[in-house]
Amino acid sequence: MPATIYYDADADLAALKGKTIAIIGYGSQGHAQAQNLRDSGLNVVVAQRPGGPNYELAKSHGFSPMSVEDAVKQADVINILLPDELAGDVYRAAIKPNLKKGAVLMASHGFNFHFGQIEPPAGHDILLVAPKGPGHLVRSEYVKGGGVPCLIALGPNASAETKKIGLAYAKGIGGTRGGVIETTIAEETETDLFGEQAVLCGGVSELIKAGFDTLVEAGYQPEMAYFECLHEMKLIVDLLYQGGLEYMRYSVSNTAEYGDYTRGKRIITDETRAEMKKILEEIRSGEFARDWILENRAGAAMFKSTRRREREHQLTHTGRQLRKMMKWIESKEV
Ligand code: NDP
Ligand code: MG
């Protein structure tokens, strides 16, 4: 079934006129959405904890950042744009006790709604408007007169009015200029987690490491392995981004294309596909969410030690040296 997609003409900013929108967290998404909404003529307040650069950024953008409690008390629409693993705690401590009658709760990712970490009392609808791009792009496209496409989804039993608020919100951040795809909170949450685990982050990281290790163990220089297995990933991804698999395969050499068709399926085997199904099932059953929530309750001990160990891989050291040789790369160090 093709998706339902909404554009500018399907959304009316009037649904948010006279209402106050609280943006909780002035990070990647928060800074972009708050400014776009304000530039669209809507009334925005920002909650941002003091002491860090985002507090100063909010001030320099002309907002008067306040506590979560104070922002929520005056808001008709509250968008929680905090790190997902912290949002539940902030919701329970500072948002839930201060909700105005009928206030709508929003997020840009469904994790906490779908897995029961944010369960507002009766009379408060849940609404998801999720830009399909990072905050800086949400802002820069809007300023240029364009917009990053968004997803929209409503919580169970949400009213028709809440849907109008959602479309108005998406219009306010520029989303309806690109197109707003209707989905469900379950679909957004499950596909987002699956994508990052199986393909984008988990899949790609392990693929790069396995390729690099194979070459290095066979006696090739790590510099060569880095170029072939990590650096050149960008060239391929750029082609994929512009024209899909067919354009990538059209652009690379015939030799590369032949190698792709005849060797790729030996890397992503039936066993890999079966494992992908298991990973999806762990997401759908809530097993992954439970693991991640408990991990955070335990101070993220395993998460932090794994992060440290992963950074000791030879790729880190080889990459640091090679990136210095390529001045055009805006090389980043963690
Ligand atoms: P960021 O990490 O960029 O920003 C988080 C914000 O939360 C910052 O303002 C930060 O303040 C604040 N914060 C962090 N810890 C605390 C705390 N303990 N108490 C109070 N405030 C805190 O988050 P993102 O913008 O990346 O993500 C926000 C939401 O948007 C998430 O639900 C994410 O899934 C979703 N999303 C993100 C996308 C992206 O590309 N980044 C894309 C689509 C959706 P401080 O600066 O002081 O730490
Ligand atoms: Mg995602």
Image: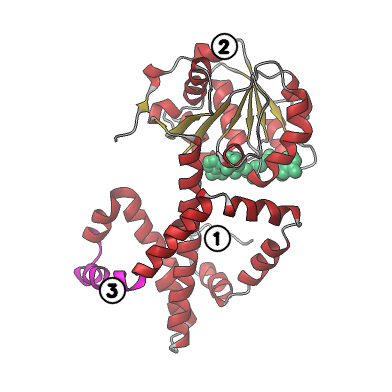
Front of the two marks 1 and 3? 3
Question: Where is mark 1, residue-wise?
Answer: 331
Looking at the image, do the residues carrying marks 1 and 2 touch, with CB atoms under 8 Å apart? no
Q: Residue furthest front?
A: 285
Question: What percent of the width, then of the height, locates residue 148?
Answer: 44, 35
Task: Say what amino acid the circle numbered 1 marks.
Answer: Ser
**Lower sequence index among marks 1 and 2:** 2
Question: Where is mark 2, residue-wise?
Answer: 17
**Lower sequence index among marks 2 and 3:** 2
Question: What percent of the width, then of the height, locates residue 106?
Answer: 59, 29
The answer to whether residue 98 is above or below residue 326 is: above
Q: Which residues are magenta?
A: 251-269
Q: Main secondary structure of the magenta part?
A: helix
Question: Where is mark 3, residue-wise?
Answer: 263
- Tell me, yes or no, whether the highlighted magenta stretch contains residue 264: yes
Question: What percent of the width, then of the height, locates residue 39?
Answer: 55, 21
**Lower sequence index among marks 1 and 3:** 3
Question: What percent of the width, then of the height, locates residue 296?
Answer: 71, 53
Looking at the image, do the residues carrying marks 1 and 3 touch, with CB atoms under 8 Å apart? no
Q: Can the viewer see residue 141?
A: yes
| Inter-mark Cα distance, 1 to 2 | 43 Å
Number of dots carrying numbers: 3
Q: Secondary structure at mark 2?
A: loop
